[in-house]
Image (cartoon, rainbow, N blue to C red):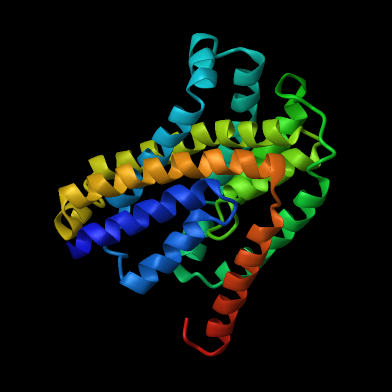
Amino acid sequence: MEELIKTILLGMIQGLTEFLPISSSGHLLLVRRLFNLSEAGLFLDTMLHFGTLLSIILVFWEEIRLLISNPFSKLGKLIIVGTIPTAIIGILFEDFFEEIAKTGVTVGWEFLATGIILWFADDIKKRGYKRLEKISYKDAIVIGTLQGVAILPAISRSGLTIAGALFRKIDKKDAATFSFLISLPAILGAVLLQSVKLINGKGLEAIETLGFIPIIVGTLTAAISGYIAVKWMLKVLQTGSLKVFSYYVWLLGSGIIIFQVLGKW
């Protein structure tokens, strides 16, 4: 029962924080430290990412269906172009990102940076006018580059890409839509890379550590909570404020920095 509760908690955190602008990797890092779940490792990560992939497909099924039927449409090309800088950054700096994630030294400061980005993005979100069909390839490259930077553990991927789209004068609803759609190849790529490592015999210890049923339940939890988070973010950008997320990550980041100063991290 304890392992089931842990995977449900991790699935909920992964689903909510993947699409809310508060950083899923940063929150999972914190939770793993609290519950000593570092041994759960790669297989659980892969399944939780797969759960969030399902949530994106469910919310944007119509757009994805059109992309599959016409992958070289304007939107399809924009997603491809935007994914290229993400992939380049991820490949070139893989070791760097992994080392930072292991130590967690910069996590507090990254949460603070995420809050600052969201604060300024909220102030400009009413100025956007570009619809999806008007997004340029330059816009896609900027957003894709920011998505690559967001591999840092406590820099929110959704927060940074939505902010980047807003700074590029993209309509707030379409900024969120493009942010979530461009995450598809990034999340799928992460799942595939992790799967290759699993095939090579790395990371399967999670099945023995946690059990197969808890991992499946955690995956479904990630999918359901991710679906809720995406729907909520679409509404927040229409009628709410991103600054509430700024307050949250500032509080969290400040707490982490205080613990580091006190030598408790």
Residue placed most toward the observer, 9 or 259:
9
From the image, which quarter does the N terminus lie in? bottom left
Residue under the point 24% across and 49% down: 215
Image position of 143 with respect to 152: above or below: above
Image position of 128 with respect to 24: above or below: above
> Which of the 4 image quarters holds residue 33?
bottom left
Among all residues in the image, which is located at the extreme right?
A: 127
Residue placed most toward the observer, 126 or 197:
126
Query: Residue 226: image x %, image y %?
Result: 45, 43
From the viewer's perspective, tell me whether residue 125 is left or right of residue 193.
right
The answer, for residue 23, to whether it is visible in the render is yes
> Which of the 4 image quarters holds residue 256?
bottom right
From the viewer's perspective, tell me whether residue 114 is left or right of residue 209.
right
Image position of 79 with respect to 29: above or below: above
Query: Residue 216: image x %, image y %?
Result: 24, 44
Residue placed most toward the observer, 64 or 143:
64
Among all residues in the image, which is located at the extreme front?
A: 239
> Which of the 4 image quarters holds residue 28?
bottom left
